[in-house]
Image (cartoon, grey):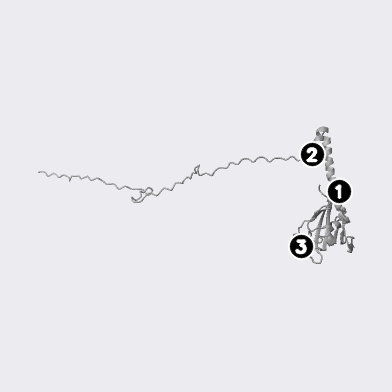
């Protein structure tokens, strides 16, 4: 009796494959969370309600132009009526007048400077009205007449007290203006100063002693400079005539 040997029954089991991952693509561990994506930039929009109001400026009206009448209308009229030559002749006439006036002024200034001289020996001069003066410098310019404009520097003080009540020689103070024959006087000026200026010339300089009757009289005055001129005060001045000219109309 033959004995048959049979192979044991083949048992098949499911094969489990272990997945292999390359180093370039590894699966993160199950517990790890994916990184948060970068925040997206926020766009800020300004609504129409938040925008500042737009101010509409109205255009300014044009400034009114004023027409100034000059002597140009004469040249225009002559040009229209008699031609271009007449207009040019009138313009040349005006130019010659301006140039001649400038030349005249320069000549007068040159003559004044040339004829002005200092006095070496000062002597007292006594006038019939009681004014006394000392000539410090003899002017070489014009002498003022009634109605002329005189520009002068002035320094005045009370004799015997030394209180100065006016001084245009000091610092940046402007000289005084005197229209001959007009009233009232500028502060610090008196009748005696006008009287003495009439006999001076432009460029001249004097030391003047004015008696009370030609100064501020028996009442005195308050010049508003902190100095009170007492009654019957004798005044001492330094007067220098800078310029003599025709007063403006």
Instruction: Report how far apart the C-alphas of labels 2 and 1 lie in the structure.
Output: 25 Å
- Mark 1 lies on a secondary structure that is helix
Using residue 47 as the reference point, say whether residue 69 is left or right of it: right
At x 82% / y 37%, what residue is drawn?
87
The location of residue 221, given as percent across then percent down, is: 78, 60
At x 82% / y 56%, what residue is drawn?
152
Instruction: Report how far apart the C-alphas of labels 1 and 3 lie in the structure.
Output: 45 Å
Query: Which residue is outermost to the left?
Result: 1
Q: Is residue 195 visible?
A: yes
Q: Is residue 134 visible?
A: no
Instruction: Report how far apart the C-alphas of labels 3 and 2 lie in the structure.
Output: 55 Å
* Mark 1 closeness class: few <14, some 14–19, many ≥20 residues within 10 Å: few
Q: Which of marks 3 and 2 is nearer the N terminus?
A: 2
Q: Earlier in the sequence, mark 2 or mark 1?
A: 2
Where does label 2 land, which residue? 72
Where does label 3 land, which residue? 228
Tell me which corner region of the image, top left, top right, bottom left or bottom right, holds residue 70. top right
Residues tagged 3 and 2 counted as in contact (Cβ below 8 A)? no
Tell me which corner region of the image, top left, top right, bottom left or bottom right, holds residue 133. bottom right
Closest to the observer: 5 or 196? 196
At x 83% / y 42%, what residue is drawn?
95
Residues tagged 1 and 3 counted as in contact (Cβ below 8 A)? no
The location of residue 194, given as percent across then percent down, is: 84, 56
Where does label 1 land, which residue? 104
Closest to the observer: 178 or 12? 178
* Mark 2 closeness class: few <14, some 14–19, many ≥20 residues within 10 Å: few
Tell me which corner region of the image, top left, top right, bottom left or bottom right, holds residue 99. top right
The location of residue 237, given as percent across then percent down, is: 82, 61
Position of the N terminus, as image quadrant, is: top left
Q: Which mark is residue 82?
A: none
């Amino acid at each position: 009796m033959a004995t048959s040997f049979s192979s044991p029954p083949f048992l098949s089991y499911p094969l489990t494959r272990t997945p292999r991952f390359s180093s370039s693509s590894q699966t993160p561990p199950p517990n790890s969370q994916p990184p948060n994506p970068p925040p997206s930039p926020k766009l800020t929009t300004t609504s129409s309600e938040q925008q500042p109001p737009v101010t509409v400026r109205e255009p300014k009206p044009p400034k009114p132009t004023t027409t100034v009448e000059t002597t140009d209308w004469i040249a225009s009229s002559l040009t229209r009526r008699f031609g271009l030559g007449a207009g040019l002749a009138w313009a040349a006439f005006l130019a010659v007048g301006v140039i001649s006036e400038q030349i005249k002024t320069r000549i007068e200034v040159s003559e004044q400077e040339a004829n002005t001289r200092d006095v070496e020996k000062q002597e007292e001069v006594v006038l019939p009205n009681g004014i006394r003066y000392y000539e410090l410098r003899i002017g070489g310019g014009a002498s003022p007449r009634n109605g002329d404009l005189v520009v002068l520097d002035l320094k005045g003080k009370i004799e015997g007290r030394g209180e100065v009540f006016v001084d245009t020689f000091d610092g940046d103070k402007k000289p005084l203006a005197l229209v001959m024959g007009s009233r009232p006087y500028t502060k610090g000026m008196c009748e005696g100063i006008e009287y003495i200026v009439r006999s001076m010339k432009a460029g001249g300089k004097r030391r003047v002693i004015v008696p009370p009757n030609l100064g501020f009289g028996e009442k005195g005055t308050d010049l508003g400079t902190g100095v009170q001129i007492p009654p019957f005060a004798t005044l001492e001045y330094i007067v220098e005539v800078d310029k003599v000219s025709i007063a403006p109309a």
